[in-house]
Amino acid sequence: MTWKQRRTNTILACIAAGMFALILILSGARYRDSRDAVQNPRASAGQPVFSGKNGEAPACTALQFQNSVAALSFSLDENGKWVWDDDPEFPLDDAALLEMIEILGGLHFQQTLDATESMESYGFTDSNASLAVTDGQGVKRTLLFGKTTTDGKSRYLQMNGDETTVYIVDGGIYQMIQTPIYDMCRLPELPDLSADKLLEIVIQGPEPEAETSESGEPEAVPEPPAVTLEARQSDGGTLWFQGNDNVTNNAQLSAILEDLNAMSFARCLDYRPSDEAAEICGFDRPEAVLKAVYGTKGSEQTVTLTVGAAMDSDRCVRLNDSETIYLLSGEFLDPMLTVAKNGLGV
């Protein structure tokens, strides 16, 4: 090999070594940037709190948040459906979670501050409000909310445990994580109980008090009184009968039919109540039980509402054989409760 060839090889080797070193430097810089973005974020005002590839918010696969009442955890199951991790069978209405994810996607830093004061002064020391977000790459970001700022609309924020930097963000996301789990319950829908779909209505009154015999032994409790209303079709439309009495024009019946067509559940009160909770809600001795038979003869179906205690203007109710307790507006039940207690005035 001539000296010219050796010189050429040396130059090429130096160029290759330089390029390799440059690649290492750039790779290291990118790694530090991505690491710091998660472990020690530093952002300017207006920058998104969550930014992924091309500046878009990363896909969210898990959410955990804590408020003053409870700690809740949610994740996507294998079917891409959001579930409550403590009870995957819970009928979760994911509307609140989707709204939260949408707010997170648009959340921006309003200010970035050096933490020149104690964590207590920002409200982090005694904070019981936090949110952890896991994206599709398994990266978890944790937000700890402090006290409100002077305008009352924003909050101090700490990210990923970094105590050197404090952020200010809009307080809307803080309000979202105060949502109780039962406010995320998907409420059941009652079937079509319009008058032309009903075949029979049975309204059972409260269970009579047990009487004591002369020997001191409790006697058998008699069956609660019941009012049975039967719909019969005629050329002129639907007629309603209680026994042999035509009660089609009865005002109480008309009110009950109107309420059955309009009623819907207000919220879930207790998904899996204890025996004590059920008793407090009045289900040890229900105020009334309504059974509505609907559909067509030969393919009838029955829906049952068990009515418990009053909660302000609402009533505790159970649907069919479910133990879950819902609240239903008392105005839908007042006519039925009157009939359950006093019978149908003919």
Image: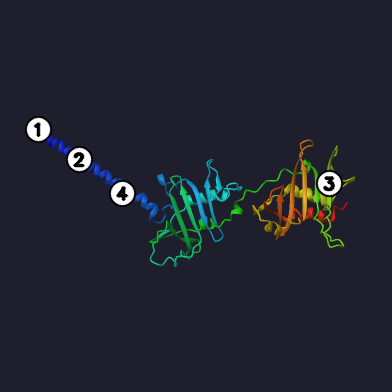
Residue type marked 4? Ala
Hey, which residue is sitting farthest front in the picture?
Answer: 215
Residue type marked 1? Thr
Residue type marked 2? Ile
Q: Earlier in the sequence, mark 1 or mark 2?
A: 1
Q: Which residue lies under the disc numbered 4? A: 29
Q: Earlier in the sequence, mark 4 or mark 1?
A: 1
Q: Which residue lies under the disc numbered 1? A: 2
In the rendered image, is residue 313 in sight?
no
How far, Cα to Cα, is label 2 from label 4? 21 Å
Binning the other alpha carbons within 10 Å of mark 3 as few (below 14), some (14 to 19) or many (20 upward) gives many
Colouring style:
rainbow
Q: Which mark is residue 229?
A: 3
Q: Secondary structure at mark 1?
A: loop
Q: Position of residue 265 (x, y in %)?
A: 68, 51
Q: Earlier in the sequence, mark 1 or mark 3?
A: 1
Hey, which residue is sitting farthest left in the picture?
Answer: 3
Q: Position of residue 237 (x, y in %)?
A: 83, 40
Is there CB contact under 8 Å for labels 1 and 2? no
Residue type marked 3? Leu
Q: Which residue lies under the disc numbered 2? A: 15
Quadrant hosting residue 113: bottom left
Quadrant hosting residue 334: bottom right
Q: Position of residue 320 (x, y in %)?
A: 72, 47
Q: Earlier in the sequence, mark 2 or mark 4?
A: 2
